[in-house]
């Protein structure tokens, strides 16, 4: 079970709403402008020299994100975690000083908690946390060195989902850019060799199996792991590249070891990765025509748009000519499960929602200034579904 008890020696590290917000506007490319220093201030947020982990309690309102800021004064092995209270299910993103996503995680902490371990160079970083279903949530976030006490238990695979064998018996993967498919029982380990420094993307797909992937380097040195990057599928991106050598990929299943899992290992494609972010609704598409965005024109009072939605986001834009309240609903009448997001034209998220009220329909309400706004809608569980999109604008009474 995920633990929330804090040791007395670490109580000074627990920063609640009194934590100092960031003043600089360019932290993590602007994503950290409203963030909180994990240690209360910048000087106390250097994880490299911290005597104990740093921790905060975070309140996430519907569709918003909580951003924790920290620094490293030297290269450091760090652990970032988030654990929701009650039924809270956090998702975390680790961002570098430019706002680039280093890693993302959903359930690697176990019990719906998030956890990731990696090695980072000296610099300033942001850990962004949001609720998986877009609803309100209270959670603890913790950032520390890997030798310090973790917040979460990690994934417990003692129930039989540990792969049999070892990297020594790994099956050769083949050429980069191809895909292979096998169950965990048949092929729990894959090996591949790189001739030189190569940026790599590794994907494991079959949501019914719920795969988890773990990458080991030469000498079976642990590098990284992932669970639930895209739905229940897993993905690892090594943007800066992996050095020449032979690598081992362990594949486990959190659901059924007999189900086939498709593994793809290819060179990292920045444009493909960006398109995937747009398809999942995790970033707003540009309005330059490179990504299809249907212009619905000026929203004066009320408009309706029918959408044949898939698991990839369908995008629309609307114009707000004056300040007012925007209410957007994705209505399926019980025939599907819509997911909804709204961004401004600079790519800042205005709101996100999955299930509103007691049903599966989605709703976002936000006060907006004049401008162009981008609405994304998709079918949450994959497949195809008919969704009716409703947008309404309300103005202040005179």
Image (spheres, grey):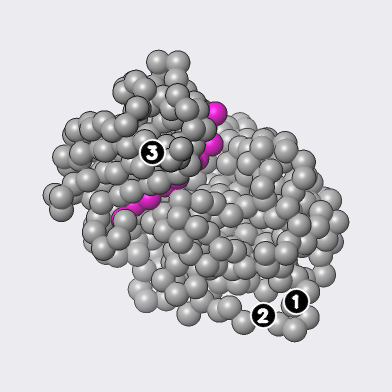
Tell how many labels: 3
Q: Position of residue 119 (x, y in %)?
A: 68, 52
Instruction: Report helix, strand or loop for mark 3.
Output: strand
Which residue, as the protein is rendered here, is positioned at the far top? 289
Highlighted magenta segment, given as a residue range: 346-355
Give me the residue at 15% from left, 53% from top.
334
Measure the C-alpha gap from mark 3 to mark 2. Answer: 46 Å
Instruction: Report helix, strand or loop for mark 2.
Output: loop
Circle 3 is placed at which residue position?
A: 394
Q: Is residue 90 magenta?
A: no
Mark 2 vs 1: CB contact within 8 A: yes
Give me the residue at 67% from left, 35% from top.
29
How crowded pointer 2 is (Cα within 10 Å; few <14, some 14-19, many 20+) is rated as few
Q: Position of residue 47 (x, y in %)?
A: 77, 59
Circle 2 is placed at which residue position?
A: 6
Q: Position of residue 317 (x, y in %)?
A: 38, 26
Viewed as shown, does residue 58 lie left or right of 331? right
Nearer-N-terminus badge (3/2): 2
Measure the C-alpha gap from mark 2 to mark 1. Answer: 7 Å
Q: Give the number of the disc on residue 185.
A: none
Q: Position of residue 194 (x, y in %)?
A: 55, 36
Measure the C-alpha gap from mark 1 to mark 3. Answer: 48 Å
Circle 1 is placed at which residue position?
A: 10
- Comparing 292 with 300, the one in front is 300
Give me the residue at 59% from left, 68% from top.
140
Instruction: Report helix, strand or loop for mark 1.
Output: helix
């Amino acid at each position: 079970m995920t633990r929330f008890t804090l040791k007395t020696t670490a109580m000074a590290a627990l920063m609640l709403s009194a934590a100092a917000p960031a003043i600089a506007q360019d932290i993590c490319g602007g994503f950290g402008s409203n963030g909180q220093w994990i240690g209360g201030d910048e000087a106390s947020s250097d994880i490299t020299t911290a005597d104990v982990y740093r921790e905060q309690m975070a309140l996430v309102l519907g569709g918003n994100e909580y951003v924790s800021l920290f620094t490293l004064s030297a290269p450091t092995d760090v652990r970032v975690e988030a654990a929701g209270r009650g039924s809270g299910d956090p998702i975390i993103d680790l961002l570098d000083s430019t706002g680039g996503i280093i890693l993302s995680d959903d359930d690697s902490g176990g019990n719906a908690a998030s956890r990731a371990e990696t090695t980072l160079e000296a610099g300033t970083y942001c850990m962004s946390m949001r609720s998986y279903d877009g609803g309100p949530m209270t959670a603890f976030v913790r950032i520390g060195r890997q030798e310090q006490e973790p917040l979460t238990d990690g994934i417990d695979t003692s129930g039989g989902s540990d792969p049999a064998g070892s990297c020594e018996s790994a099956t050769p993967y083949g050429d980069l850019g191809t895909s292979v498919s096998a169950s965990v029982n048949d092929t729990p380990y894959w090996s591949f060799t790189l001739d030189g420094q190569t940026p790599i993307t590794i994907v494991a797909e079959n949501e019914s199996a719920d795969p988890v992937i773990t990458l080991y380097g030469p000498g079976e040195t642990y590098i990284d792991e992932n669970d639930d990057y895209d739905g229940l599928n897993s993905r690892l991106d090594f943007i800066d590249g992996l050095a020449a050598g032979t690598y081992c990929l362990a594949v486990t299943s959190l659901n059924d070891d007999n189900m086939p899992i498709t593994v793809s290992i290819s060179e990292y494609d920045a444009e493909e990765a960006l398109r995937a972010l747009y398809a999942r609704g995790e970033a707003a598409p540009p309005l330059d025509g490179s990504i299809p965005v249907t212009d619905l024109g000026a929203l004066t009072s009320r408009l309706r748009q029918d959408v044949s939605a898939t698991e990839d986001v369908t995008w629309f834009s609307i114009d707000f000519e004056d300040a007012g309240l925007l209410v957007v609903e994705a209505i399926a009448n019980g025939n599907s499960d819509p997911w909804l997001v709204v961004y401004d034209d600079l790519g800042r998220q205005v709101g996100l929602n999955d299930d509103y009220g007691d049903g599966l329909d989605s709703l976002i309400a936000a006060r907006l200034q004049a401008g162009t706004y981008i609405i994304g809608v998709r079918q949450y569980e994959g497949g195809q579904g008919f969704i009716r999109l409703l947008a309404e604008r309300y103005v202040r009474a005179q």
